[in-house]
Image: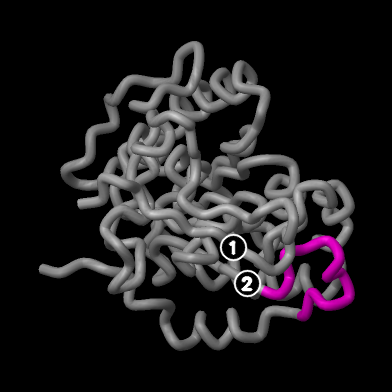
Amino acid sequence: MLEFDPGPPQSVAAHLMAVPSYAAHRELFWYDWGPVFYRGRLDGSAKLLCIASDPGPTERIAGRTLVGDAGQRVQGFLNKVGLSHSYVLVNAFAYALLPSKAHKGTAILSEDAHLTWRNALLDMIVGPSLQAVVAFGGQAQAAVQLWQDRPDVPLVEVAHPSSRHEPELVAGWHAAIDTLRSVVTPDDGADPSLPNYVGKVLESDYARIPVRDLPFGVPPWLGDDHAGRTGKPKRRNCADRPSDDLLHTLVWQAPADQP
């Protein structure tokens, strides 16, 4: 059976299309490229909800969140928990934050329109199968604390996958895997006994993004930046924003050895 993400259910799609305007804060965001909303299951079947901060350039290419370097780290995290498909991933912000302005964005999470829309989305995409929530990084953790009707399941708060403090990330993610393995039921056929994080993030701790999470028609290498991470010069993402035009230009580079 050919696997790909067919897009959100109509009710969820309608809500996503009603995302509040970010125009009043456009100086903080990579605004002109528009929002990116989710990856994974939106039908209430997810056992694990993961929330991160905001989408990046590779996410804009895919139209799905957490598919670049950070997303491939998260996919490795999900694999260690024992989940191959029963998850849903969203962000605190639907638009990409400019890295130099990220610290100014947190207050927006509490603005009525954004708070109401985000909480309604979270309510829509979780169901009785939910067994835990993971918040990656400070903005995601702030968003979770503002989720008024958060289900009564364990909340795990860890460093964002793009954190530059690797020892803290590894220690926190190691503990999170131990916790989640005790509360999340593995998916059929998944292996929850993969090696946990130790010392530093290894290439084996990454995982490619499953095709079931991506739209039909994307290149087969999208969601797998192994070649860039292990090559010289090192390149962590297939898409990037050049510093001389951070707001309006995106550079997308295919691997030289693409299949």
Sequence order check, earlier mark of 2 and 1: 2
* Label 1 secondary element: loop
Quadrant for the N terminus, please: bottom left
Foreground tag (2 vs 1):
1
Q: Residues within 10 Å of mark 1 (few under 14, many from 20)?
A: some
Residue 157 in view here: no
Q: Position of residue 226 (x, y in %)?
A: 35, 37
Q: Position of residue 111 (x, y in %)?
A: 87, 68
Q: Which residue is labeled 2 in the image?
A: 35
Residue at horizontal 73 percent and vertical 61 percent from the top? 245
> Label 2 amino acid?
Pro
Residue at horizontal 60 percent and vertical 56 percent from the top? 56
Instruction: Left or right? Give the position of 186 relative to 178.
Output: left
Instruction: Left or right? Give the position of 167 relative to 8.
Output: right
Residue at horizontal 68 percent and vertical 60 percent from the top? 96
In this view, the residue in front, 116 or 170, is 170
Instruction: Left or right? Give the position of 37 relative to 4.
Output: right
What is the chief secondary structure element of the magenta stretch?
helix
Q: Position of residue 100 (x, y in %)?
A: 82, 47
> Label 1 amino acid?
Leu
- Measured in 3D between alpha carbons, the distance from the residue under mark 2 to the one under mark 1, in whole angstroms, is 15 Å
Q: Which mark is residue 250?
A: 1
Res 197 → quadrant: top left
Q: Position of residue 159 (x, y in %)?
A: 64, 33
Residue at horizontal 66 percent and vertical 28 percent from the top? 164
In this view, the residue in front, 251 or 1, is 251
* Label 2 secondary element: loop
**Which residue range is magenta in the image?**
21-32
